């Protein structure tokens, strides 16, 4: 399911995915492409059109980066399984968006201060650098394997764990850790 909010190029809102299955990610990519075409409808790149196109492309880059982060986090935390096709769709979207955003940013750099300062230009350059780095150093997200379980513990099991921990005998009064680093931490914790 795709939730869309915002204006003609998505300003004031962002695309949010309720799921990260292939159909949802494909719809997200199609919506970004549609918004990208709307970003580029201005003729001649005069100052006002260029300013609008810069802000629009910055919004697209921001939305893509945010959605990628949410997807990677969901895979890492085990909320969803990693899917190579979803990854390929996201990577294709980066490859599709970057050349357009770079062209608009270059045009903006050339015409900055011609009529007025293009406020979103620095943000667009920063977002392009983020996407460039991500594309060049791509690492597929994986499920975390430590330090704790990535599944929800049922309430009954949580209560049972708490009860069992509560029944453990307390440490002896003269107990101290054996590891030197733990001793230092323990001593600091006792003094605070």
Image (cartoon, rainbow, N blue to C red):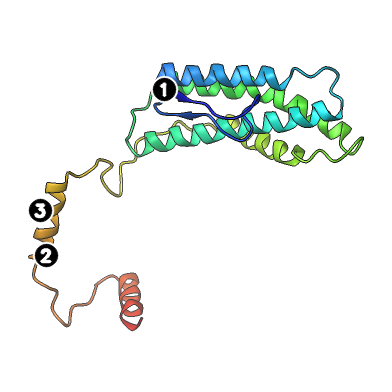
Which is in the foreground here, disc 3 or disc 1?
1
Which quadrant, please, contains the N terminus?
A: top left
Which residue is the extreme one toward the right?
Answer: 114
Residue at 86% x, 19% y: name it: 44
Secondary structure of the residue carrying numbered label 1? loop
- Relative to 12, residue 84 above or below: above
Q: What is the x, y in percent for residue 46?
A: 87, 25
**Which residue position is annotated with label 2?**
166
Q: What is the x, y in percent for residue 139?
A: 48, 33
Secondary structure of the residue carrying numbered label 3? helix
Q: Residues within 10 Å of mark 1 (few under 14, many from 20)?
A: some
* Relative horizontal placement of residue 44, taking residue 192 as reference (left or right): right
Q: Earlier in the sequence, mark 3 or mark 2?
A: 3
* Relative horizontal placement of residue 123, taking residue 15 as reference (left or right): right
- Relative to 143, residue 168 above or below: below
Residue at 17% x, 82% y: name it: 174
Q: What is the x, y in percent for residue 93?
A: 57, 21
Q: Separation of disc 3 and disc 2 at Cα?
A: 10 Å
The answer to which image quadrant residue 71 occupies is top left
Q: Separation of disc 3 and disc 1 at Cα?
A: 37 Å
* Relative horizontal placement of residue 173, taking residue 8 as reference (left or right): left
**Which residue position is annotated with label 1?**
1
Q: Separation of disc 2 and disc 1 at Cα?
A: 44 Å
**Which residue position is annotated with label 3?**
160
* Relative horizontal placement of residue 68, taking residue 184 as reference (left or right): right
Which quadrant, please, contains the C terminus?
A: bottom left
Q: Residues within 10 Å of mark 3 (few under 14, many from 20)?
A: few
Question: Which one is nearer the viewer's eye here, 75 or 44?
Answer: 44
């Amino acid at each position: 399911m795709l939730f869309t909010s915002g204006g003609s190029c998505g300003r004031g809102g962002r695309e949010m995915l309720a799921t990260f299955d292939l159909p949802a990610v494909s719809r997200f990519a199609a919506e970004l492409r549609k918004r990208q075409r709307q970003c580029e409808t201005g003729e001649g790149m005069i100052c006002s059109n260029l300013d609008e196109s810069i802000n629009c492309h910055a919004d697209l880059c921001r939305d893509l980066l945010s959605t990628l982060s949410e997807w990677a986090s969901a895979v890492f935390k085990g909320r969803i399984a990693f899917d190579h096709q979803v990854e390929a769709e996201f990577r294709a979207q980066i490859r599709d968006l970057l050349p357009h955003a770079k062209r608009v940013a270059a045009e903006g750099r050339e015409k900055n201060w011609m009529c007025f300062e293009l406020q979103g230009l620095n943000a667009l350059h920063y977002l392009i650098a983020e996407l460039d780095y991500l594309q060049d150093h791509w690492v597929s997200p994986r499920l975390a394997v430590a330090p704790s379980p990535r599944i929800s513990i049922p309430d009954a099991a949580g209560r049972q764990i708490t009860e069992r921990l509560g029944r453990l005998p307390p440490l002896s009064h003269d107990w101290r850790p054996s590891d030197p680093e733990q001793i230092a931490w323990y001593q600091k914790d006792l003094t605070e």
